[in-house]
Image (cartoon, rainbow, N blue to C red):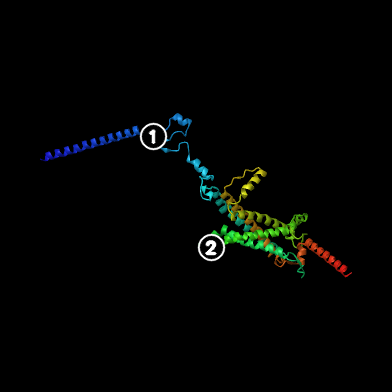
């Protein structure tokens, strides 16, 4: 009985093995049959361009690499690198129906250069330039001290600037101070001010400061225009300005007073520096207040290329124009800050009696003779002529 059960078990196991083999062979035959049917029936569709299309013959591909389809739906001789290289150059990815046409530009690589320059050399060298100017002024004050009126105050005054002149000066100066503080906040505030007052307060101050910066720009440009119209005739360079420069204006040596008219060579340098840098900062700032409306750098580069034979890019994207305007505006603004620091120093702490010129408009006669002797002589001669003419008129009227 035991032997019979063992035989039955062996027969059962052998039967299962045979069944498994038969099943496996049947499955393989079925798969082969289905694959054959698919290939035979699918050839026309494949030739029509399905995903499993057979490649063109080798000679055909050598003659025309774009003919036929590559197995696996690969690009073949067409590379994605060409596509992305074009996108990285700023080429538009198509057309858009919205008014903002620049949205068709997927990637603007110049933005990387803009960010790297703004956060790197511009910020770093800008800080060093302003700190350097403060250090130079501090050393000059430590060595030279305050430039005094050597003859002492005379008690007599002479009109240095009229009310209109002082109004134009303070209009430009006051608006520039506001713009300098708010502009420096945009450049450095995130690193200096935000850690002290927090993100919310910094965001509010920066937003208000940006609005003040934009609106004060018109006051600054108005002030510059007024000053240019009134003072340009006095700031034309002359031969005596060269002599003033060679002697350092007498600023470095006590008892030395160099001839000068209403504006000396140093003041003329400040005048033209402020006018040119202010004009450049105003134009670049205008292009940011009214973005994508100007093409200042494209036109400038065309002129530079024509004059110097350079190869600066002239077909700039609108956003690239804005980035260059922002960088140039910052450079001109930092230059103006350095110039105005020197101007403020000499007009307040650096020289006795200088602030009166823009404070009341009347300066001490001895101060005027020591720093602008030729101008004083011109004023006195003019007053003498007027007095003589007035006397003649009075005598003629009495006769």
SS category of the residue bearing label 2: helix
Q: Nearer the viewer, residue 110 or 226?
A: 226
**Numbered mark located on residue 204 in the image:** 2
Q: Measured from the top left, where is residue 11 in percent x and y?
A: 16, 37
Q: Measured from the top left, where is residue 397 in percent x and y?
A: 87, 69
Q: Is residue 379 left or right of residue 351?
A: right
Q: CA distance from mark 2 to mark 1?
A: 65 Å
SS category of the residue bearing label 1: helix
Residue at figure coordinates x 57%, y 58% from the top left: 186
Quadrant into which the N terminus falls = top left
Q: Is residue 395 depicted above or below 79 in this figure?
A: below
Q: Nearer the viewer, residue 245 or 43?
A: 43
Q: Is residue 261 depicted above or below 28 in this figure?
A: below
Q: Are marks 2 and 1 in contact (CB under 8 Å)?
A: no
Q: Measured from the top left, where is residue 256 in percent x and y?
A: 76, 61
Residue at figure coordinates x 44%, y 30% from the top left: 58
Q: Nearer the viewer, residue 120 or 160?
A: 160
Q: Measured from the top left, where is residue 77 in percent x and y?
A: 47, 36
Quadrant into which the C terminus falls = bottom right
Residue at figure coordinates x 63%, y 47% from the top left: 299
Instruction: Using the rendered view, name the quadrant where residue 334 is placed.
Output: bottom right
Q: Is residue 350 visible?
A: no
The residue positioned farthest toward the right in the image shown = 399
Crowd band around label 1 with a 10 angstrom C-alpha radius: few (<14), some (14–19), many (20+): some
Q: Is residue 13 visible?
A: yes
The residue positioned farthest toward the top in the image shown = 59
Residue under label 1, please give it: 46
Crowd band around label 2 with a 10 angstrom C-alpha radius: few (<14), some (14–19), many (20+): few
């Amino acid at each position: 009985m035991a032997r019979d059960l063992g035989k039955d078990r062996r027969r059962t196991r052998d039967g299962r093995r045979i069944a498994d083999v038969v099943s496996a062979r049947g499955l393989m035959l079925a798969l082969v049959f289905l694959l054959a049917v698919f290939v035979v029936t699918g050839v026309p569709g494949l030739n029509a361009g399905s995903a499993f299309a057979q490649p063109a013959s080798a000679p055909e591909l050598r003659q025309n690499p774009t003919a036929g389809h590559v197995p696996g739906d690969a690009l073949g001789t067409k590379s994605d690198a060409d596509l992305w290289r074009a996108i990285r150059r700023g080429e538009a990815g198509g057309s858009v129906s919205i008014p903002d046409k620049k949205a068709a530009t997927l990637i603007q690589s110049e933005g990387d250069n803009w960010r790297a320059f703004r956060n790197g050399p511009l910020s770093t060298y800008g800080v060093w330039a302003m700190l350097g100017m403060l250090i130079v002024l501090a050393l000059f004050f430590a060595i030279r001290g305050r430039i005094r009126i050597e003859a002492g105050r005379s008690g007599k005054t002479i009109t240095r600037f009229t009310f209109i002149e002082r109004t134009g000066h303070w209009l430009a100066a006051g608006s520039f101070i506001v713009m300098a503080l708010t502009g420096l906040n945009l450049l450095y505030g995130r690193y200096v001010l935000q850690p002290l007052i927090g993100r919310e307060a910094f965001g509010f101050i920066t937003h208000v400061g940006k609005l003040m910066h934009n609106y004060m720009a018109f006051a600054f440009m108005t002030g510059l225009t007024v000053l240019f119209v009134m003072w340009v005739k006095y700031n034309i360079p002359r031969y005596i300005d060269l002599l003033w420069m060679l002697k350092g204006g007498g600023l470095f040596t006590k008892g030395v007073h160099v001839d000068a008219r209403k504006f000396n060579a140093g003041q003329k340098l400040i005048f033209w520096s402020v006018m040119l840098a202010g004009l450049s900062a105003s134009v670049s700032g205008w292009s940011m207040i009214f973005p994508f409306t100007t093409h200042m750098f494209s036109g400038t580069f065309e002129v530079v290329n024509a004059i110097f034979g350079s190869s600066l890019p002239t077909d700039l994207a609108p956003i690239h124009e804005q980035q260059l305007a922002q960088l140039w505006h910052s450079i001109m603004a930092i230059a103006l800050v350095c110039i105005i620091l020197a101007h403020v120093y000499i007009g307040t702490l650096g020289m006795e009696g200088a602030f009166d010129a823009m404070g009341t408009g009347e300066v001490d006669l001895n101060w005027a003779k020591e720093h602008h002797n030729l101008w004083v002589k011109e004023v006195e001669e003019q007053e003498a002529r007027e007095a003589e003419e007035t006397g003649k008129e009075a005598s003629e009227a009495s006769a």
